[in-house]
Image (spheres, rainbow, N blue to C red):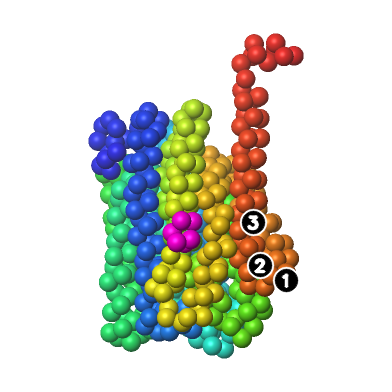
Amino acid sequence: MSDNHSKNNSSPTALGTSPIGRLLLQYSLPAIIASVVTSLYNIIDSIFIGRGVGAMAIAGLAITFPLMNLVIGFCTLVAVGGATVSSIFLGQKNLQRATDTVNNVMLLCIVHSVLFGGLTLLFLDPILRLFGATEETLPYAREFMRIILYGTPISYLFIGLNNIMRATGYPRKAMISALLSVGVNVVLAPIFIFHFGWGIAGAAGATIMGQTCALVWVMTHFLSRDSYVHIVWRDRFFVPSLVKRIYSIGLSPFLMNCTACLVVVFLNKSLLDCAGDMGNTAVGAYGIINRTTMFFVMIVFGVTQGMQPILGFNYGAGQRARVMSTLRRGMVCGFAISAVGWMVTECFPDTISALFTTDKTMIDIARSGFRTYFICYPVVGIQIVIQNYFQSIGKPKISIFLSLTRQLIYLLPLLYILSHLWGVTGVWASMAGSDVLAFLTAIITLWITNRRYNRLHAPQDTVSSHA
């Protein structure tokens, strides 16, 4: 599907008519490429930090993960909600409301970034200590997060508008903006870290510079009248009913990031308690595992990002068969991606860890973590796809429930019990156990909702024959 929207297949209405397989490829492939590149950047950035600054810098970076999840959470509350709402409006052939969505997302991104970024900067040190920072890791975590928080207005606008650009029929442009962000980042990070000697602050600065360049590209798209959905300055920038709808749908990924923040805090604290003198090293090992697992999760997210406009449009247009076909294909892709993740980490745990650090103890701890945590990893991709399916069709309550099961309801009790039984190995095992339980919950929930839908929409003669 061409991004220039010529008259036939290139219009967003092709989402309701073109073959599902072709659409999924056209929308998911650019999102997957962008996700892979972004994930590779995160890994390369961590390698630069580990090699250029030291093992404690890796541990300090791991301490920032909960706060980074919160930063992303307040952005996805608007970005994912706005993307879903805009694609549903396009499915309903309501271009005006899709345009209003862009304006409202812009305003909400600015408001969120100023409020969240400003408040967090005021209390940065206490927050990082709460998240597990020690005297050794706090300086690195503080230095990194301070620059990231200063750049939140840029980050939020870029992520929010890029999601809408993809959802309104421009997947390749959205991919280019992500590649631009990462490309600038990868070029500048080693210069800032090694040449200028700015350390971990240089890595954060390179991140913001990359997002600034990408934001310019995205704004150029939305300011152009040739874009199918673009900014119209005379339209309303605050529509209460629209804001409420954006928040209700975006609440699922927001809570997912908030619970991920909470979970990482508990994981870090459990590792610090269980590993004793090796606590900071264990946290660093978890940082390596986290970066690796997020690489494969981000690829699955690329699939779900490609699914989202297809699901939203066809759900809005009432085309149930196309919705279910998209879901089935997405589940297969999710399983295949996470299965590859399991195989790679099973075969090459030490090789992966050695990319980040030369610390033998950290590599040994990470090896155990890879082997234990990833044992049930193939089912993770299916659970993520099902959760995002409910989000994409505007059923946030179910999506929220599924996100909470994996990251909160199952993980925290397992973490408490297994870490007391088996120490650090129990920490890794609790993550694997929660993945399996969350997968089973997602499958059962999908079966129940599909059965309920089929019962409600059964042909009248069938219903009366069973009466």
What is the spatial separation of the Cα atoms under label 1 and label 2, in whole angstroms? 7 Å
Q: Residue at x 38, y 54 (%)?
A: 162
User: Which residues are drawn in magenta?
Assistant: 342-347
Note whether 211 is above or below 325 in the view shown.
below
Q: Are marks 1 and 2 in contact (CB under 8 Å)?
A: yes
Question: Which label belongs to residue 426?
Answer: 2
Name the one closer to the observer, 165 or 307. 307
Name the one closer to the observer, 229 or 29. 29
Label 2 or label 3, whichever comes before in sequence order = 2
Q: Amino acid at mark 2?
A: Gly
Q: Amino acid at mark 1?
A: His
Q: Residue at x 34, y 73 (%)?
A: 206
Local SS, label 1? helix
Question: Residue 416: where, in percent of width, then height?
Answer: 72, 67
- Counting other residues with Cα less than 10 Å from the Cα at mark 2, is it few (<14), some (14-19), or many (20 or more)? many
Question: Residue 3: where, in percent of width, then height?
Answer: 28, 43
Name the one closer to the observer, 40 or 314. 40
What is the spatial separation of the Cα atoms under label 3 and label 1, in whole angstroms? 16 Å
Q: Nearer the viewer, mark 2 or mark 3?
A: 2
Looking at the image, residue 358 sits to the left or right of residue 173; the answer is right
What is the spatial separation of the Cα atoms under label 2 and label 3, in whole angstroms? 12 Å
The overriding secondary structure of the stretch rendered in magenta is: helix
Q: Which residue is mark 3?
A: 434
Q: Are marks 3 and 1 in contact (CB under 8 Å)?
A: no
| Residue 405 painted magenta | no
Q: Quadrant of the N terminus?
A: top left
Label 3 or label 1, whichever comes before in sequence order = 1
- Counting other residues with Cα less than 10 Å from the Cα at mark 3, is it few (<14), some (14-19), or many (20 or more)? many
Q: Which residue is mark 1?
A: 420
